[in-house]
Amino acid sequence: MYECNANDRNELESIQGQILERIQYLRERNLDITTDEILLDYYSFNDEVISCILDDHSFSPIIFGIMAVVGVFILYRIWKLRKKKFKRF
């Protein structure tokens, strides 16, 4: 269980980087992303850190907006990459 602290935002950045690295690693080896235990643990840890940040009363709505925009951008890029893969066939 993750304990909230002043470095939550740094932890969030770190765990999201680890998630991306793990996804790239799994894709390079053609392994199943949905059943990888390490990736699931990373996502669980990510959820705990996000909960700490959102429960923090000093958390600015501007930062939440920035996080939402970045999340949408990442989802858009993933969607475009998948769409591009299907066009090749």
Image: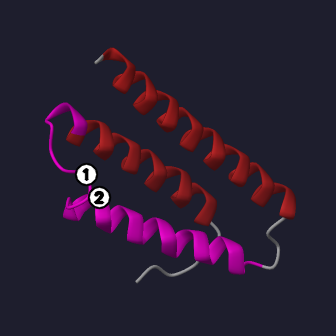
Q: Amino acid at mark 1?
A: Ile
Span colored in magenta: 27-56
| Magenta span dominant secondary structure | helix
Q: Please indicate whether residue 23 sits to the left or right of residue 20 in the image.
A: left
Helix, strand or loop at label 2? It is: helix
Q: Position of residue 35 (x, y in %)?
A: 20, 61
Say which of 13 and 67 sits in front: 67
Q: Position of residue 73 (x, y in %)?
A: 63, 39
Residue that mark 2 sits on: 39
Query: Is 38 within the magenta?
Result: yes
Q: Quadrant of residue 55?
A: bottom right
Q: Position of residue 65 (x, y in %)?
A: 79, 55
Residue sitting at x 29%, y 58%? 39
Quick check: 25 above or below 48?
A: above
Q: Is residue 5 visible?
A: no
Q: Please indicate whether residue 82 sits to the left or right of residue 5 in the image.
A: left
Q: Quadrant of residue 27?
A: top left
Which numbered circle lies on residue 87? none
Residue sitting at x 34%, y 41%? 21
Q: Is residue 89 visible?
A: yes
Residue sitting at x 44%, y 45%? 17
Say which of 63 and 68 sits in front: 68
Figure quadrant of the C terminus:
top left
Q: Position of residue 4 (x, y in %)?
A: 57, 79
Give the colour scheme of this rendering: secondary structure
Residue that mark 1 sits on: 33
Marks 2/1: CA–CA distance: 8 Å
Q: Disc 2 vs disc 1: Cβ atoms closer than 8 Å?
A: yes
